[in-house]
Image (cartoon, helix red, strand yellow):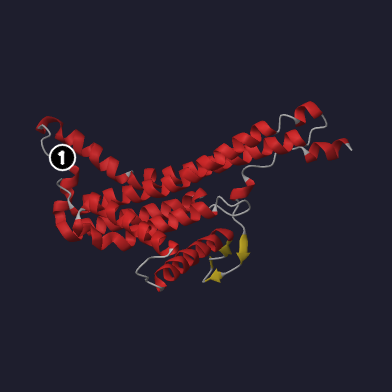
Amino acid sequence: MADGAHSGSAMPDPIHQFEINRLWHIDLFGFDASFTNSALFMVVAVALIVGFLLYAISGRLLVPSRLQSLAETAYEFIANMVRESMGEQGMKFFPLVFTIFMFIFTVNMLGMVPGFFTVTSHVAVTAALALLVFTIVLLVGFAKNGLGFLRLFVPSGVPVLILPFVTMIEVISFISRPISHSIRLFANMLGGHITLKVFAGFIVMLLGSQSVAVNLLAPLPLAGAVALMALEFLVAFLQAYVFTMLTCMYLNDALHPGH
């Protein structure tokens, strides 16, 4: 009985929720391309985004429905972000920026559902997104400006004596962009979900105690968990916004390296 009581009030493992599980084994020319729970939720996110947008714009009513208004709000929100960051010529990157925002926002929100998998809690996913942006910035920068893209590393108005030092700092800063870009999203989502699981674990431990006095303390971590849940919803949106805004800023550097 003592063992049963102890196990019933044990703290749940906060890391277990991030485990990647293989759903279908796929061997592609000797490479393990298995379909995992992470891939499943990415597919679900894409399906939800496509389904939502297609359904929202299918009617194209003069007086928009709620879903159509929501889709138009999302469009204008990202379009304004692109225009403010890159100007009108940056609108050719709108499909990329809009896709990145909607994908990150959707997988973040899916991760808030109990029992669902948080895709952006794995650095492999966020690093892939950051490297995609980094590669596009390099391609666009050299394609549009040629070697003039290297002006990005030579700020104007810097004294000649310290110019090599400043240039070195700019190069290191540029190369480290994918690291900070990916870790910021990954760390915030990972840390937030671990904290939520820990608070939920406190509730289970307190309710599982045989002491009535300890049971009465359970509402305290419950209130904390509710407050953290609300904060985590805000963080889920803000991290999608920050990742997208940084993408716009980096693309602006590719378009205007000398500015």
Q: Quadrant of residue 103?
A: bottom left
In front of the other: 192 or 148: 192
Residue 223 in the image: state x and y as whole percent. 62, 35
* Residue 134 location (% of width, % of height): 32, 53
Q: Residue at x 19, y 43 (%)?
A: 153
Q: Is residue 186 or residue 192 the one in the foreground?
A: 192
76 left or right, relative to 145: right
166 or 41, which is in the foreground?
41
Residue 92 appears at what percent x and percent y? 24, 63
Quarter of the image where the C terminus is located: top left
Badge 1 is on which residue? 155
Q: Is residue 119 visible?
A: no
Q: Residue at x 44, y 46 (%)?
A: 185
Compared across the picture, whether 19 is left or right of 96 comes to right
The spot of residue 205 in percent (x, y) is 73, 35
Whether residue 105 is visible here, answered yes or no, is yes
Q: Quadrant of residue 76?
A: bottom left
